[in-house]
Image: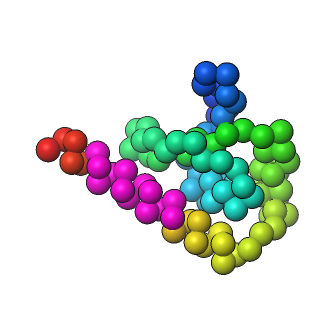
Amino acid sequence: MNLREVSDMGMNNFETSDLYLAAALKIHNFKLVNLQRSGGRAVFIFEDRPDRETMMRQYFSGELTGSLKIFISVLSDLRSMINQMGMSNERKRE
């Protein structure tokens, strides 16, 4: 799993290639600002927040709570975004 803090034009962002972490952050209202491909993997770029480290600690320790129904819905949405990105990249190569 890749985790990285990035700064872009004065905005602090955070990126991860962990799909499940991305879904967990989304259900806790982290703003997804971009989705990119890197080495065949999807990279989710979020606007960083001061509470991100706490959220991640809770996520990895199994203490982060939230609606499972919303998590599954967000997970499905993120997978669809990845699939759409792959399809649009294939069209560009044609």
| Region in magenta | 77-89
The single residue placed furthest to the top in the displayed view is: 9
* Residue 24 placement (x, y as % from top left): 69, 59
* Residue 40 placement (x, y as % from top left): 39, 44
The answer to which quarter of the image holds residue 93 is top left
Residue 81 falls left or right of residue 63: left
Question: Is 88 in the magenta?
Answer: yes
- Principal SS element in the magenta part? helix
Name the residue rendered at 69%, 30% in the picture: 12
Residue 94 visible here: yes
Residue 26 falls left or right of residue 64: left
Name the residue rendered at 72%, 38% in the picture: 48
Q: Is residue 24 above or below residue 94?
A: below
Residue 19 falls left or right of residue 27: left
Name the residue rendered at 52%, 42% in the picture: 34
The answer to which quarter of the image holds residue 73 is bottom right
